[in-house]
Image: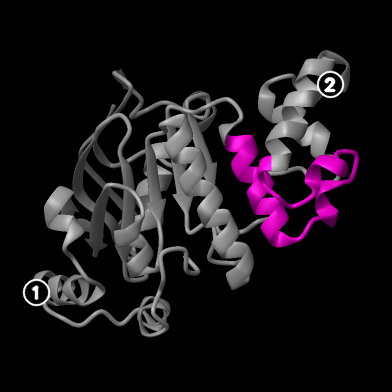
Amino acid sequence: MLEISGISKTFNPGTVNARLALDRVSLSVREGDFITIIGANGAGKSTLLNAISGDFITDEGKIVLDGDDVTLAPPHMRARRIGRLYQDPMRGTAPGMSIEENLTLAAGYGGWLSHITAADRKRFREKLALLDMGLEDRMSQPVGLLSGGQRQALTLMMATINPPKLLLLDEHTAALDPGAADKVLSLTESIVREQRLTCLMVTHNMQSALDLGNRTIMMNQGRIIFDEEGSARAGLTVGDLLDRFRQDAGKNLDNDRMLLSEEQGGGRHAHA
């Protein structure tokens, strides 16, 4: 479904600020995979998602999405098949437009309310009701007035209202308070499962990385150093992940957010 073959990316090449962000990364993603991605700051997690969505052209390697070579394709071409959420709840929606107008845009009607039918509005209300945030009764309200959790939940709904071939989640609950994060993460799990989406989710919460999805990869210094699934993954603990990082990276994991989430217990739907 997604085949990444030997991609590399160096930012600011030839300068004192040169940084190798991706180092010959290869990854094979099957249709229906829900892969969680962990690693320290600067490991290349977000850069990998950026490469897939076309935010930049890689220096080498190939990216094939659903059988098509998209290595040189611009972002807007890839966006037809890729849904994405970012850490910042302010991204992904138009704050000056109403909830209904945002959903109309996401559904592919160009933002023109005259193009949607009573059946469309009914579908919007039903989907909003699933969020359990009361948004179905506020469809005419500007999105800019919503809380971060409400806005991120709406963004998730917009990204999946027409099920994408691939869903990319870049620490999409990290900026939310724990309660909102828990709700959005539960919603994410439900949508991915019910729509049978193929999903890559970057998270700093190692327990969530083990609890969610069917496969976990760990990155360090632009490389994938760990890729586990099935029964081998099912028996892993957060301590095992820390040991594996130490073994492969030759040092202790020093990401404060990741270690804090581990110390706090990081339950199944903990702040991710």
Q: Which residue is mark 2?
A: 112
Q: Amino acid at mark 2?
A: Trp
- Give above or below for 16 relative to 79: below
Please name the residue shown 25% across and 32% down the image. 30
Q: Position of residue 69 (x, y in %)?
A: 30, 22
Report the span colored magenta: 130-159
Q: Which residue is mark 1?
A: 247
> CA–CA distance between discs 1 and 2?
55 Å
Q: Nearer the viewer, residue 211 or 115?
A: 211
**Callout 1–callout 2 Cβ contact below 8 Å:** no
Q: Position of residue 190 (x, y in %)?
A: 49, 43
Label 1 sits on a secondary structure element that is: helix
- Give above or below for 2 relative to 15: above
Count of residue discs: 2
Please name the residue shown 58% across and 55% down the image. 184
Q: Amino acid at mark 1?
A: Gln
Task: Assign the magenta stretch its main secondary structure.
Answer: helix
Q: Is residue 150 magenta?
A: yes
Q: Dot 2 surroundings within 10 Å: few (below 14), some, or many (20 or more)? A: few
Label 2 sits on a secondary structure element that is: loop
Please name the residue shown 89% across and 45% down the image. 141
- Give above or below for 42 relative to 140: below
- Give above or below for 162 relative to 129: above
Q: Is residue 230 left or right of residue 157?
A: left
Q: Is residue 172 visible?
A: yes
Q: Nearer the viewer, residue 159 or 94?
A: 159
